[in-house]
Image: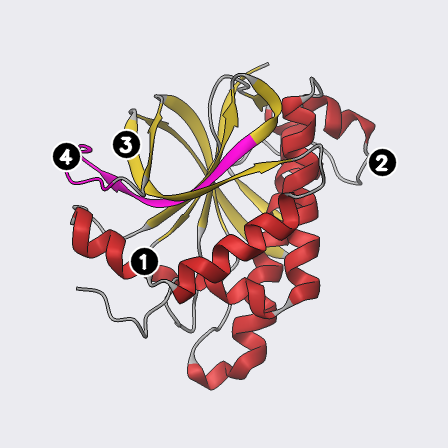
């Protein structure tokens, strides 16, 4: 059983409103372009060209920090958790997600996920699932990877994530231990996540030889490596295909 004191570091972001809103703006822009016909590749093309030439290695620099990028084939998997429906076009996305994270904390949903579903491995997945009937609507889901949906309750949401090729980005390590104080938890970790998302779409795609696979899902993965450690990290999975 997971202690209530060991809350997902994902929830720490809401404590710093400025960082939270900036990070969501990046996600919103990417989601909007994907939903309304502007691919991430086109998004990159519209950005001001960055300095530096192609890099054939899978290790790149992000703000002077070496970032290890892994290309993997990941089989289809199942996610069960809690979610919230929101709408990009109506401008509700930011407020809805903030309220959802508050509820995730207050209602103790993380502990409920592990107690009810008994996932084979610790780790939370955060992903946005588009509504096939309404391009401006989506469901944001925060859950765990499960082998089946046998123990899912009526208040939970289920998602089947298809097989895909992913570029996996691990954020630069930051200190979120007690020794780092509140700044390490509230500012540095959200900043590392935000800068990694920016790096992916502003720089990595440009020279990688890959493009975003529109038929798949990107997601964030938070495991035991992001629980109040001096080397806290999380992973971002981006579905890709060759240009």
The quarter of the picture where the C terminus appears is: top right
Gap between marks 4 and 2 measured at Cα: 49 Å
**Which residue in the structure is indicated by mark 4?**
150
Name the front one of labels 3 and 1: 1
Image-based side of 35 in relation to 111, left or right? right
Mark sitting on residue 48? 2
Residue at the spot of label 3: 78
Residue 152 sits inside the magenta stretch: yes
Name the front one of labels 4 and 3.
Answer: 4
The answer to whether one can see residue 40 in this image is no
Sequence-earlier tag: 1 or 4: 1
Separation (CA) of disc 3 from disc 1? 17 Å
Residue at the spot 50% in from the left edge and 67% down from the top edge = 12
Q: Secondary structure at mark 1?
A: helix
Q: Which residue is mark 1?
A: 110
Contact? badges 2 and 1 (CB < 8 Å): no
Residues at circles 4 and 3 in contact by the CB criterion of under 8 Å: no
Residue, far top: 243
Between disc 4 and disc 3, whose residue precedes? 3
Quadrant holding the N terminus: bottom left
Front residue (pair 146, 187): 146
Mark 2 lies on a secondary structure that is: loop
User: Depth-wise, is mark 2 or mark 1 nearer the camera?
Assistant: 1
In which image quadrant can residue 55 be found?
top right
Q: Nearer the viewer, residue 61 or 181?
A: 181
For the residues labelled 3 and 2, the Cα–Cα distance comes to: 38 Å
**Looking at the image, residue 14 lies above or below residue 218:** below
Segment tinted magenta in the rendering: 138-153
Residue sitting at x 43%, y 83%: 178
| Image location (x, y in percent) of residue 149 | 20, 33
* Residue sticking out furthest to the right: 48
Callout 2 crowding tier (Cα within 10 Å): few <14, some 14–19, many ≥20: few
């Amino acid at each position: 059983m997971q202690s209530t004191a060991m809350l997902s570091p994902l929830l720490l972001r809401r404590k710093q409103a400025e960082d939270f809103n900036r990070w969501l703006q990046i996600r919103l822009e990417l989601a909007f372009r994907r939903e309304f016909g502007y691919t991430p590749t086109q998004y990159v093309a519209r950005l001001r060209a960055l300095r530096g030439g192609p890099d054939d290695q899978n290790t790149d620099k992000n703000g002077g920090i070496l970032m290890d990028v892994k290309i993997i084939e990941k089989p289809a998997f199942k996610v069960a958790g809690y979610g919230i429906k929101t709408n990009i076009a109506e401008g509700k996305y930011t407020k809805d997600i903030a309220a959802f994270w508050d509820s995730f904390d207050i209602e103790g949903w993380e502990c409920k996920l592990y107690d009810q579903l008994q996932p084979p491995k610790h780790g939370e997945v955060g992903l946005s699932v588009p509504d096939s009937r309404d391009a401006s609507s989506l469901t944001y889901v925060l859950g765990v990877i499960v082998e089946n949906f046998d123990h899912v309750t009526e208040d939970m949401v289920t998602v089947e994530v298809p097989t895909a090729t992913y570029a996996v980005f691990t954020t630069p390590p930051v200190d979120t231990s007690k020794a780092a104080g509140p700044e390490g938890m509230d500012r540095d970790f959200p900043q590392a996540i935000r800068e990694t998302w920016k790096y992916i779409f502003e720089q990595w795609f440009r020279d990688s030889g890959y493009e975003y696979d529109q038929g798949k899902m990107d997601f964030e993965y938070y495991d035991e490596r992001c629980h109040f450690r001096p080397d806290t990290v999380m992973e971002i999975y981006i579905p890709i295909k060759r240009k």
